[in-house]
Amino acid sequence: MSTAETLPVTFEDVEDARRVIRPFIAETPFAHSVTLSQAVGAKVYLKLENLQMTGSYKERGALNRLARLSEDEARRGVIAFSAGNHAQGVAYHAQRLGLAATIVMPVYTPLVKVMATRRYGARVVLHGQSAAEARAESHRLAAEHDLVHIHPFDDRYIVAGQGTIGLELLEQNPYLDAVVVPIGGGGLIAGVSLVLKETNPRIKVYGVEASAMASMKVSREAGQVTEVPSQRTLADGIAVSRVGEIPFRIAERYVDDVVTVDDEEIASAILTLLEVEKTMVEGAGAAALAAVINHHLPIGGKKVGLILTGGNLDVTMLARIIERGLVKDGRMVRFSAQIVDAPGALAALTTLLGSLDANILQISHERAFARGPLGVTQVEVTLETRGHEHIKEIVTGLESAGITVTLG
């Protein structure tokens, strides 16, 4: 593909970005996972961008953009809007370069990201219930205070900075068949796909979005950038209602396909990475694995690289995500059952569950509001289980004992 010169970003721009940021950005590992490879039937390699100083790939583009400021722009200071990772990248490198930085974040931004951004010396403004509202406020403040706006993805220097990951992928494993990239605003997949396709067009580049906000997929189907409604998702780092014009143009040329994953699949992928790889990633960072492990992409038998984009996960959210992942994997289940309201009935139920190798996590006994005839009581039970087949065995065992079970 030799027409990249007609696009806003070129391969040479990415090489130049690497020269600028290389002294200050970690070249993260691109590790082979034997266990995940066996699980999905492909050779899986993980690009661990969660190991960057700010816990995300975002600082690559942020630094490349900040390095291009004129003396006058540097004196005025910068502003950005972000749900967290771009904010930290801008704040950290602005502090290192001696620049004043203001960051506008949606009010729902995880506390860990807000605190980290403040720790890097930025002034944080919490505003709006969505990234779009935070974006509007950042533009208003930029105009009011004459600040330089640092866009998180719709900027040629940002795209070039993120594209440096593509250069590393090729150096660390030049024999890749495919790369799977999470998509928010599109800056990462634009930069990475440009580098990979210009170097080796046979490499497949797949994008993954949260199904709640699949703005790139919708835009590709419409043939133009199209905004989707803002919704909440575990993958807050890629919860973008409108992809950038620059990333969209590049992705249209180089990206082979875009798929979506739901929150249950994302939660399960986070749990898998914790247990199997001992690696903590946030929702957006787990999106690539979620797509692969749920067989949304044709990567069987291929050498495939997954970009784990970030690891800034609030520990309070982690507990909820783990529980959702356990439910998705069939390792935790809740059911209600009706039993006779008589001495020994509850004990008989728990004994039966024990004989079925189910571990009771929580149980509640309801008489006054139980549905059904008098003399019957309703029991709500949460169990630790071994998987979906084990759940079926438990249900069968209970029903064989004359106990009606309702899952969920």
Image (cartoon, helix red, strand yellow):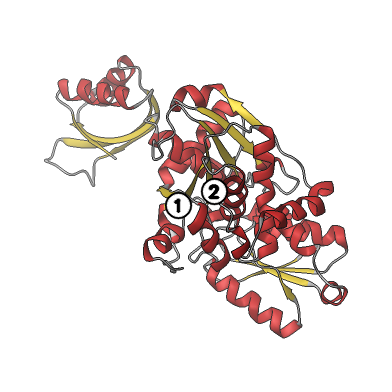
Residue 284 - label: 2
Which structural element holds mark 2? helix
Residue at left offset 64%, top offset 29%: 31
Are the residues tagged 1 and 2 within 8 Å (C-beta)?
Answer: yes
Q: What residue is drawn where x is 17% and y is 25%?
A: 399
**Left-right relation of 337 to 201:** left
- Above or below residue 71? Residue 199 is above
Three-letter code for the amino acid on which mark 1 is drawn: Ala
Q: Residue furthest front?
A: 2
What amino acid is found at the position of numbered circle 2 in the picture?
Ala
- Mark 1 lies on a secondary structure that is strand
Q: Quadrant of residue 150?
A: bottom right
Q: Residues within 10 Å of mark 2 (few under 14, many from 20)?
A: many
Quadrant in which residue 402 is drawn: top left
- Relative side of 64 to 218, left or right: right
Question: Disc number at residue 261?
Answer: none
Q: Is residue 98 above or below residue 59?
A: below
| Residue 27 rendering spot, x and y as whole percentages | 74, 40
Q: From the viewer's side, name the closer residue of 12 and 262.
A: 12
Is 356 placed left or right of 302 in the picture?
A: left
Residue at 63% over, 61% down: 5
Q: Position of residue 217 (x, y in %)?
A: 42, 57
Task: Looking at this view, name the residue that lies furthest to the bottom.
Answer: 144
For the residue pair 74 and 82, the one nearer the viewer reads as 74
Question: Can you give x and y, in whole percent of width and height, for residue 340 in the image?
Answer: 17, 30
Res. 280 visible in picture:
yes
Residue 292 coordinates in the image, percent (x, y): 45, 36
Height in image: 154 above or below 251? below
Q: Is residue 121 visible?
A: no
The residue beneath circle 1 is 210
